[in-house]
Image (cartoon, rainbow, N blue to C red):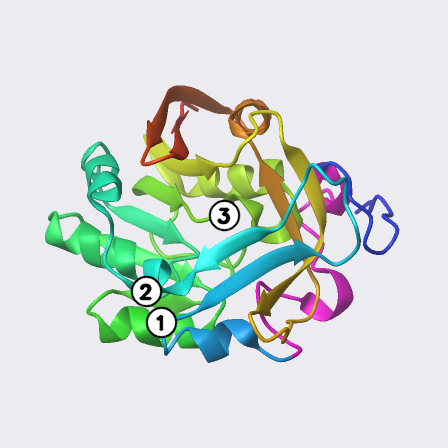
Amino acid sequence: MSIQAVPRGSGTRADAFATDTGPVALFGQALFGQGGHEPYARSLPLGLGRLTLRPESALPESIGPVHFNMLGWSGPATAGERELLRTLRGPVLDVGCGPGRMLEAARELGLASLGVDSSPAAVRLATDRGGVAILGSIFDPVPHERGWGSALLLDGNIGIGGNIRVLLERVASLLAPGGQVLAEAEAPDFLDVASLAVLEDSDGRASAAFPWARAGSKALAFHAARAGLDTVATRTVQDRVFLTLEWRP
């Protein structure tokens, strides 16, 4: 195994956190929103407020923080999200399922689905609303490997692990031939950055730092191609950009 060293808190391309076998969980296996003051676990049960994802250290001014509305995360899937789900075939794997709104929507549309999330609070909420969800990392063993019809990487989850190519390679390895990934990108199109990040609530209570990545549609398509996935559609729905990526082994 070889590791490319990265200065603490530096902003760089996503390959910075890669090893030959997967992403590096830096600084004590840090995970999204966990550790520190646990703002994610505190906010999830309430379903209210705003969380901010920001780099631990400064990035260029053009790359601002990301704000998450907890009401939107905890509420039902939007009409646009449901339309996107209708384009996919099951079973559906929701990577970073959070409190389970997309699992709920998939079930209502008649799609078998499973969520994977590293947050115990999120998994509890997802199962409480009738979804099937397991606690763990997408890089751990997952049921039905090589049999998933589709996978979801929404709400910034393309950043899991800090290396988009490695994440997409892992997700592709879980799909059946011809399976698809519905992945959400950011603006601008060529945004492509990885850094140590923290999640912070409106009172300034922050999580521990964790590796995270962000990408616009062009950069995401580039990483997808390197991971063996073809970009077959790009859609803008309610001011959000989604790529449909297809696995053709």
Left or right: where does residue 155 sit relative to residue 82? right
Residue at position x 60%, y 67% from top?
Answer: 200
CB-based contact (under 8 Å), mark 2 and mark 1:
yes
Residue 118's place in the image compared with 37, above or below, is: above
Query: In what element is the residue under mark 2?
Result: helix
Which residue was labeled with disc 1? 47
The amino acid type, in three-letter code, at marker 3 is: Gly
Query: In what element is the residue under mark 3?
Result: loop
Q: List x then y, in percent, for residue 37.
A: 62, 80
Residue at position x 12%, y 47% from top?
Answer: 109
In the image, which residues are magenta? 14-36
Between marks 3 and 2, how big is the CA–CA gap?
A: 15 Å
Look at the image and tell me whether residue 136 can be seen: no
Residue at position x 64%, y 43% from top?
Answer: 163
The amino acid type, in three-letter code, at marker 2 is: Ser
Question: Earlier along the polypeptide chain: callout 3 or callout 2?
Answer: 2
Using a 10 Å C-alpha cutoff, classify the residue at mark 1 as few (fewer than 14 neighbours), some (14 to 19) or many (20 or more): some
Which residue was labeled with disc 3? 156
Using the image as rendered, state which of residue 104 and residue 190 is in the foreground. 190
Question: Earlier along the polypeptide chain: callout 3 or callout 1?
Answer: 1
Look at the image and tell me whether residue 104 can be seen: yes
Using a 10 Å C-alpha cutoff, classify the residue at mark 3 as few (fewer than 14 neighbours), some (14 to 19) or many (20 or more): some
Q: List x then y, in percent, for residue 82.
A: 20, 43
Residue 187's place in the image compared with 166, above or below, is: above
Q: Kindly indicate the quadrant of the structure image that contains residue 153.
A: top left
Left or right: where does residue 19 sit relative to residue 148? right
The amino acid type, in three-letter code, at marker 1 is: Gly
Which residue was labeled with disc 2? 74
Query: In what element is the residue under mark 1?
Result: loop
Using a 10 Å C-alpha cutoff, classify the residue at mark 2 as few (fewer than 14 neighbours), some (14 to 19) or many (20 or more): many
Left or right: where does residue 142 sit relative to residue 127? right
